[in-house]
Amino acid sequence: MQLYQLQSKQVFPIGKKEAWDFLSDPKNLAVITPQHMGFHILAGADRPMFQGQVIQYIVKPFPLVSTKWVTEITHVKEGEYFVDEQRFGPYSLWHHKHFLKEVPEGVEMEDVIDYKLPFGFLGQLTHPLLVKKQLQKIFEFRENKLAELFGKVNGKENYLSIRKV
């Protein structure tokens, strides 16, 4: 069983409350997802985020491939972090932690995703060729979109890493 981990950190010149209000609204996931992914919320995003919330989406991870994705918000600490876990979807495991931390320049947003691909060895073969590249593109888009919405901090480098764990 091969696990992978994506880690991303970005700093924005906004307050923690503004960042939390944006990130904890499930409808904003569509704003920070590339349009070519055909992301569409089917159900569960009609309330502010809460522990136990189940959200259903349709997403196209690759051209001509559409899948239903169901996540549950399993942990929430208001203004600090939340965790979403895939219940049904394209991964064998998807555990996504979102952290917010005040820093002198504003707020640091950190994502840590532990994931496993289906199909054993065949799934592992697709990781460097397809999955890793797709996740990098998604998080680069997200970084650019958030910078467009909230601004950039000069001299502060963003961080993105995807590795086997």
Image (cartoon, helix red, strand yellow):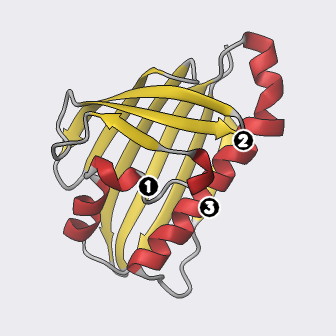
The x and y percentages for residue 66 are 60, 31
Residue tagged 3: 140
Residue tagged 1: 110
Type of amino acid under label 1: Glu
The x and y percentages for residue 89 are 51, 23
Residue tagged 2: 132
Which one is closest to the eye, mark 2 or mark 1?
2
Give the mark, 3 or 2, whose residue is nearer the N terminus.
Answer: 2
Tag 3 secondary structure: helix
The correct choice, above or below, for 100 with respect to 50 in the image is below
Front-most of residues 13 and 151: 151
Q: Distance between the residues labelled 2 and 1?
A: 18 Å
The correct choice, above or below, for 69 with respect to 16 in the image is above
Front-most of residues 31 and 148: 31
- Look at the image and tell me in which quarter the C terminus lies: top right
Q: Which residue is drawn at 42% across and 52% down?
A: 30
Type of amino acid under label 2: Lys
Relative to 95, 106 lies left or right = left
The reply to whether residue 165 is in sight is no
The x and y percentages for residue 31 are 43, 59
Type of amino acid under label 3: Glu
Q: Residue at x 51, y 53 (%)?
A: 33
Q: In which quarter of the image is residue 104?
A: bottom left
Relative to 135, 25 lies left or right = left
Q: How far apart are marks 1 and 3 (CA)?
A: 14 Å
Report the disc number at residue 127: none
Give the mark, 2 or 1, whose residue is nearer the N terminus.
Answer: 1
Give the mark, 1 or 3, whose residue is nearer the N terminus.
Answer: 1
Tag 2 secondary structure: helix
Which one is closest to the eye, mark 1 or mark 3?
3
* Residue at the farthest bottom position: 154
